[in-house]
Image: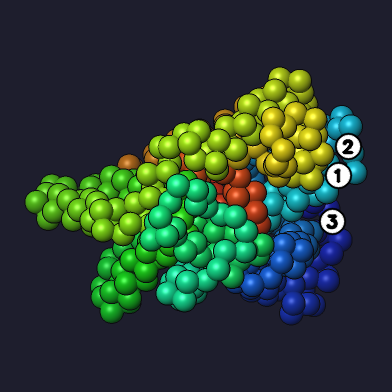
Amino acid sequence: MFSNIIYKVQDKLKILYDNSLFLQNIDIFILFSIISVLVSSLIFDSDYIGFIALVTIFLTVVKILTKQRENFSFNTFEIFIILYFMIVLISLAGSSLFTLSLKGFLKTFLYVGFYFSTAHYLKNNLSKIPLLIFTIAFCISFESVVALLQNFSHVEAISTWQDTSGLNPEEVMTRVYGTLKPFNPNLLGGYFVAGIPSLFGMCAYFIFHNKYKFAFISIVLSLLSVLALFATGCRGAYLALILILALTFIVSAKFFWNSYKKVYLSIIGGAVALFTTALIFVISLRARFLSIFAMRNDSSNSFRFNVYQSSIQMFKDNWLLGIGVGNRNFREIYGLYMKTGFDALSAYNIFLEIAVESGIFALIAFLAFLIVLVRDAVKIILNSIDIETIIFISAALISILALMFHGLVDTVFFRPQIQFIFWIMVAVVSAYKKVNNLLI
């Protein structure tokens, strides 16, 4: 029924489409707007980034309403995205702080709308996936250079980003934050987690196409990005990087294990040795990494544990519909539960955050979306014979899984710079799934 309504509108506007050069080339403008979202994330505030994303949604709607036989099609995990969004909408209606929740809901609408716009574009323009992955890799490379320059200049911390009590001066780390706003090393760390798989993907892409000069440049930029990630001092990003490297080696084993087993194992051993050497000889890095296991003896850890306890209690009291989506809403309600004298902007765990803000059913819908997404991506990786497909869907899957792993201890995932990369990666999986279904 919905499709029939769209087709009728398209028939009415057919004459407009046939006589408009802009509408006939609207895909060019949609692609430009998606790339602009990624590039603008490097320097602009959230409002400006969101406005550009809104342009992407608007252009997609115009395309669907004017181009003949253009329509949305949904796969299984996209149905769970829609279900999650509908539950968030119900949570908004039941929130005691409706105005603050409305602001958070509008952000959710923007992210989901941007996803469906990007997915719809890529499903019909599969050849543009390398360009988007390249853009993400470029942005990550830019931030890595900025971060390393900040590290060499020993940039001063804008806030208390490290518990220095009990540390010698040489153990205090210079935590870089790049150009992402608001300036925060954990945000930059999460940004690297989201984007470094794109750099790895471009390395494999250039090697596959025998463009070895570009492959060498990609490898160098990948190493710089890994070093920059370490310089953020983001401990959650450290753990996520280990997962990224592990998943990368697992996927690459499909191609190299049988023929290059010794070389493959040597590379793995070299990576482990390099990481171990860095921990041994870089005193500030070792102190920062070991603080992960300090538990309550580290103030940052202790603060998070207190937030977890309070957030769990918030969820118990609002388990059905939550308190309403949005960090401002969370901040207001958290004041009634906090166990310390310090305020908290989030639950420092994205799954707990979803449960607190939108209730148990929203969490179930989000988890179902992730499970089906990962299942579909793994199936394509195992069954596809197209190397380029395997490269890019692997990069997307590794990015998604690494972000979810990092999200166990932080909620910078909800910042637009990371959110938009996440949804582009999901759109990549969706586009390849559509092609895979057609081939089957």
Give the left or right position of residue 48, taking residue 197 as reference. Answer: right
Which quadrant is home to the C terminus? top left
Tell which of 334 and 38 is nearer to you: 334
Give the residue type at disc 3: Val
Q: CA distance from mark 1 to mark 2?
A: 6 Å
Please say whether residue 305 is visible from this viewpoint.
Answer: yes
Residue 434: percent from left, percent from top: 52, 48
Quarter of the rendering containing residue 59: bottom right
Q: Dot 1: what SS? A: helix
Name the residue: 83% across, 48% down: 103
Residue 77: percent from left, percent from top: 58, 37
Q: CA distance from mark 1 to mark 3?
A: 36 Å
Q: Dot 2: what SS? A: loop
Check disc 1 and report the residue beneath it: 100
Give the residue type at disc 2: Leu
User: Nearer the observer, disc 1 or disc 3?
Assistant: 1
Residue farthest to the left, as pictured: 262
Residue 8: percent from left, percent from top: 83, 53
Tell which of 275 and 438 is nearer to you: 275
Check disc 3 and report the residue beneath it: 9
CA neighbours of label 3 inside 10 A, class few (<14), some (14 to 19), many (20+) = some
Give the residue type at disc 1: Leu
Residue 106: percent from left, percent from top: 80, 49
